[in-house]
Image (spheres, rainbow, N blue to C red):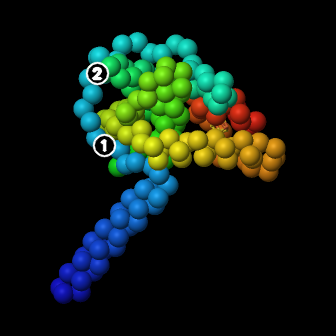
Amino acid sequence: MMLYLYLAIFILILGLLLLWLAARSQKSAGLPGGRIIYTDTRAWGSKLEKSLYDSSLGLTGKPDYLVEKDGQIIPVEVKSGRAPEEPYDSHIFQLAVYCLLVEKTMNRKPPYGIIHYENRDFAIDYTDDLRKSVLDLLIDIRSNERRSDIPRSHNISLRCAKCGFRNVCEQKL
Ligand code: SF4
């Protein structure tokens, strides 16, 4: 009986340690965790039709919605499927690209963006660290542009179609 108790305590401690390590690595990558929020999707209006484009960064992207709230423009990215415990890094980066594009093209820096999953919405704060991470990623992509040995990690054309790095990526589908 005691053995089961020790085992349960050990598993609990291990789980907490893994959670702490995951949160720490996300933080050190400059990625904020998501805040779960309630959003009224009826207030979003219609889907964005045209992509946003900034020539100084050579960056383009199309958030699903741009929502005006308290004088701010909030980009919204809609994901199919149920929400993970925390938004994936790739989803956070994609949303951060949209925040950067709103900032550049509309001259209004969004305080946060929203990732909308089927069952839950996350607000992702557009922090200075996140902004810097996106700009660093862009520099990385550019500096690797001439390398031909970096394989694309997927075959999902929809992902490429909505990717903010399309016009600098030679492997887009
Ligand atoms: S392959 Fe290129 S365009 Fe497609 S998702 Fe990856 S970075 Fe974006």
* Marks 2 and 1, the one that precedes in the sequence: 1
Residue count near mark 1 (Cα–Cα under 10 Å), binned few <14, some 14–19, many ≥20? some
Q: Nearer the viewer, mark 2 or mark 1?
A: 2
**On the rendered structure, is 55 left or right of 115?**
right
Residue projecting furthest to the front: 107
Indicate the quadrant where residue 139 lies: top right
The image quarter in which residue 20 lies: bottom left
For the view shown, which residue lies furthest in the bottom direction?
2
Q: Decide: marks 2, 1 in contact (CB < 8 A)? A: no
Say what secondary structure mark 1 lies in.
Answer: strand
Q: CA distance from mark 2 to mark 1?
A: 19 Å
Give me the residue at 71% from left, 33% from top: 168
Kindly identify which residue carries mark 1: 35
Q: Where is mark 2, residue-wise?
A: 70
Residue at image position (27%, 28%) is 39
Residue 110's place in the image compared with 151, above or below, is above
Label count reads 2
Q: Amino acid at mark 2?
A: Asp
Decide which of 168, 72 is in the foreground and name it: 72
Q: Residues within 10 Å of mark 2 (few under 14, many from 20)?
A: few
Residue 158, visible in the rendered structure: no
Q: What residue type is disc 1 on?
A: Arg
Ligand 1 - quadrant of the structure image: top right
Q: Is residue 41 above or below residue 28?
A: above
**Where, quadrant-wise, is the C terminus in this rendering?**
top right
* Image coords of residue 108 (percent x, y): 44, 24
